[in-house]
Image (tube, helix red, strand yellow):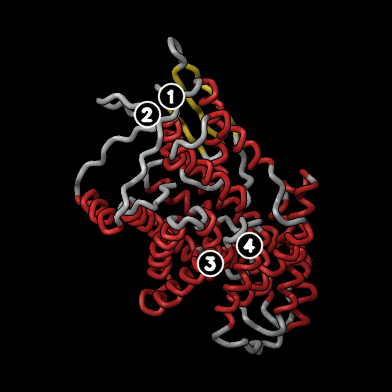
Amino acid sequence: MAPRQSSPSDEPRTPGHRRPERRGFWGRIAHIAQNLAGEVPATPEPVVAQPPEQVLELLRNLGVALTRTGEPADRVTQILDEVATMYGATGVTFFVVPTGLFVRIDLGPASQVDFKTGGSTPMRLDQVDALYRLVDDIRHATVDAATAHRRLDELLSAPPRFGSVVAVIGSGVLTLGLGLMLNPTVAAMPAFVLLGFLTGFMRWWADKDPMLSLMLPVATAFVVTWAVFGWVAPLLDAPPLEIVIPALVTFLPGAALTMGTVELSSGDMLAGSARLVYGLERLLLLSFGIAMGAQLAGIPTLSGEPARALGAWAPWVGVLVFGVGQYVASSAPRRTLGWLLVVLYVGYAVQFLAGRTLGSLGASFIAAAAVLPVCYAIQSRRSGPPVPVTFLPTFWLLVPGALGLQGVAQIIGADEAAGLGDFLNALMSIVAIAVGVLVGSGISERLGRATSTWRGI
């Protein structure tokens, strides 16, 4: 993306000072909302200008942490720009890419440019929550640069809330929930749990072995597919891919593909194209593992009689099971399970109802646009978690990644025409979700600024 520089103001500003808002249409709405609530927005106390060297170090590490949450590059730039302004830094310029950033800052008579690399390893939900609460405290002028840097180091090095055994169990519960939503049959439920345990064990092993971590998508897809095609599918007399996919959904790059599309839509060609290439490459790795496992195990012979489903209630229970598993497996912060379930059910219900009249593309757009305002409304409450904590898990419900994964597997296998059609439909749905994210975030921020409780993360 193009570098962005802190804009100089015609009027002098001290850290913590905010320009009076223009009284336009949204300004009048904010004024009316504040009068009805009988509240006056609190003005943060000015923060003493911090040493530029400390601010530079904080901006480097904070920016890399934000990129690991999956935030678009322009959003990371906006947050860092506000942090620099709060600490009185001048001449600050950022160049953000998905795995690192450059920072330039004035140091009196000279300036300094620094760079820090990041990584593709996503942060846990408890770390995401602590990170955005730190950003919120900085924006409200309650911490200095040294304290902010110390808190950032602490949250990045904090251990998971749950141990490895509990995380593996959570992976099995999560996979069972996805299985109930994608293939709700009685016979397949134990298989979903066991495959989820296997997937969780592979993740735990990869954390201990750097070599396996590089090949984790391929290795997991191969092991799961080989086991399903060789034993599980013949035993259950069920289509093997319908059992394989729920165990691999958490490896799907739905967030990367969607955020890449959002970045390209906003003009961030470098960050957007890099994220899209990464997402497609990860999807192909998963599909390669599936194809290799299927070729080694062989295509099972089935009777052709479809298994009896549990009923229309099963997917709705699956959302609950998935939310509980996600809460444990992703180490979500305390007192967020209820909020997470609210967002998951809203997203699933909107997508389910809209799909009956608007089709899959319209349902994906409407669901993405409807979920974000709910996330912002939850964030505005004192006990509500930041938006990314509740919104990130919904990607596995909104993005039809399983369809895309099955499509690529069919392209590699025997049914190229059907696989290509499924894959293209999945990509179109991702575009629809990206447009919904843009619309939903725009509406949420505009309406959110009309209330004094909006934290503005």
Q: Secondary structure at mark 1?
A: loop
**Cα distance in 3D space between marks 4 and 2:** 38 Å
Q: Nearer the viewer, residue 197 or 323?
A: 323
Q: Is residue 311 above or below residue 431?
A: below
| Disc 3 element | helix
Residue type at mark 1? Ala
Q: Which mark is residue 6?
A: 2
Q: Nearer the viewer, residue 163 or 370?
A: 163
Q: Which residue is mark 1?
A: 89
Residue 191 image point, x, y percent: 74, 75
| Residue at x 65%, y 54% (from the top left corner) | 285
Q: CA distance from mark 3 to mark 2?
A: 38 Å
Q: CA distance from mark 2 to mark 1?
A: 9 Å
**Secondary structure category for the residue under label 4:** helix
To which residue does mark 3 refer?
397
Q: Which residue is mark 4?
A: 327
User: In whole angstroms, how far apart are the C-alphas of marks 1 and 3?
Assistant: 41 Å
